[in-house]
Image (tube, grey):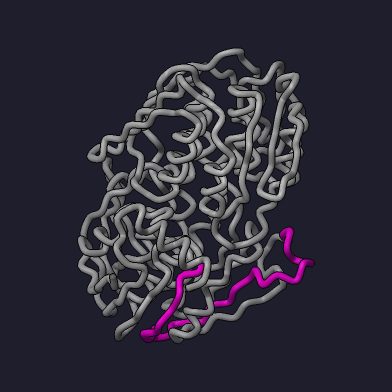
Amino acid sequence: MNTITNDSARAGASVGLTGDTIVFNGGRPLAGRIEVRGAKNLVTKAMVAALLGEDVSVLRDVPDISDVRVVAGLLTLHGVKIDRNEVSGDLRLDPTNVETAHMAEINAHAGSSRIPILFCGPLLHRLGEAFIPDLGGCRIGDRPIDFHLEVLRNFGAVIEKLPSGIRMSAPEGLHGAKVTLPYPSVGATEQVLLTAVRANGRTELRNAAIEPEIMDLINILQKMGAIISVDADRVIRIEGVERLGGYSHKALFDRNEAASWASAALVTKGDIYVGGAKQPEMLTFLNVFRKAGGAFEIHDDGIRFYHPGGELRPVVIETDVHPGFMTDWQQPLVVALTQAHGVSIVHETVYEQRFGFVDALVEMGSDIQLHRECLGSQECRFGQRNFQHSAVISGPTKLKAADIEVPDLRGGFSHLIAALAAEGTSRVSNVGIIARGYENFIAKLETLGADFTVEA
């Protein structure tokens, strides 16, 4: 096994997945109801935010995924007491006794998640120092931490790079700063928010990300006592405060998981009710889903996604920051677009290497060509950098069974639904990585009537 497989196996095992390979008998529509809980991209950051408070916090509707367990492990190393209600998904986080963790223990988490970089600001406020190990995460493109480090320097952090990671200190405390992002990065925006709320003075962040998960994190920080304003022109202003308390908050639903199941319904000609999904955060996806020939019904407690019959239609998609079409939505939807009658184009503008999952789809019979040019109305950051970041999908093509290996989180789910739609028996390996962001996906597949076995 390679390193990715070992990591994914551990990730799957941490949430009860007994094997790292699934054998699918495809060609059966998925139908039924499943539930989605809090967004992976929010709950892990909200857990880190609890470090900033001096009282107990309660985060509700937290999914049981391996990324949550990684963050919980790091928080526990730093003295945060965590109690979980397995039925409701509520987390109680008590940061009363925050302390410095041993470097070796922290380093044991290296490669498991990129979340540790966001511990920096809170730990510098609470302890005056922080150590961050080497960072992992899905291999979908360059996610440099240099900008994170530069932001922290602007706030007054002193940074020392070591062979095993990065040590930081704040001998004179942290102060407010003026920060302009070259790109509205979600991670960089989170870094500024988690650092600025307790920094001395005012912080102004320009060209900030305004994703729903960012806004929900701001809601949490405001509940804790932070003073944050958001302007219409992507400017966030924070007035630092000396003390923050705890929070009680129900996490925003995972719109990425909801969109993934919607795409699964479309490509398998199925009918999936996604409990917990909400319309406002999925507005852009719903428009594209309808244009492609999918149908949906909005209800108070969820959204029903289904294939209404007839032919699927080609679409042109350009991924973008919110309120644009999310990069995490395109990979599962590409599988459905292989069944559309005509030529679809997907221009990826967020991550430069997000089409690694396409090779397996081509092996399964799809007609997908990758291009280095910007095939869309907007020029993006990758147009002159020799990355294959535009896909042309011609269809429909009949998907055939194959043995494939999961490359990353969203690409991995795309492989699952391709195997479910293909005629014959497919063997999908390295599936543990999917447990990073999809809670109980094995049980959900069973609920929806998928025909598969998990190899122990």
- The C terminus: image quadrant: bottom left
Q: Nearer the viewer, residue 232 or 33?
A: 33
Q: Is residue 293 visible?
A: yes
**Image point (77%, 67%), residue name:** 385
The span picked out in magenta is 380-407
Q: Is the residue 87 above or below the residue 142 in the image?
A: above
Q: Residue furthest top?
A: 242
Rendering coords of residue 340 (x, y %):
44, 76
Total label count?
0
Q: Is residue 384 part of the magenta span, yes or no?
A: yes
Q: Is residue 219 visible?
A: no
Rendering coords of residue 276 (x, y %):
31, 44
Name the quadrant containing residue 414. Answer: bottom left
Rendering coords of residue 314 (x, y %):
49, 73
Q: Nearer the viewer, residue 258 or 439?
A: 439
Q: Is residue 48 part of the magenta span, yes or no?
A: no
**Image point (34%, 81%), residue name:** 426
Q: Is the residue 77 above or below the residue 28 in the image?
A: above
**Image point (41%, 56%), residue name:** 11
Q: Is the residue 276 above or below the residue 456 in the image?
A: above
What secondary structure do most residues of the magenta stretch adopt? loop
- Whether residue 453 sits left or right of residue 431 in the image: it is left
- Whether residue 105 sits left or right of residue 207 in the image: it is left
**Image point (33%, 38%), residue name:** 61
Q: Is the residue 169 above or below the residue 443 in the image?
A: above
Rendering coords of residue 67 (x, y %):
44, 48
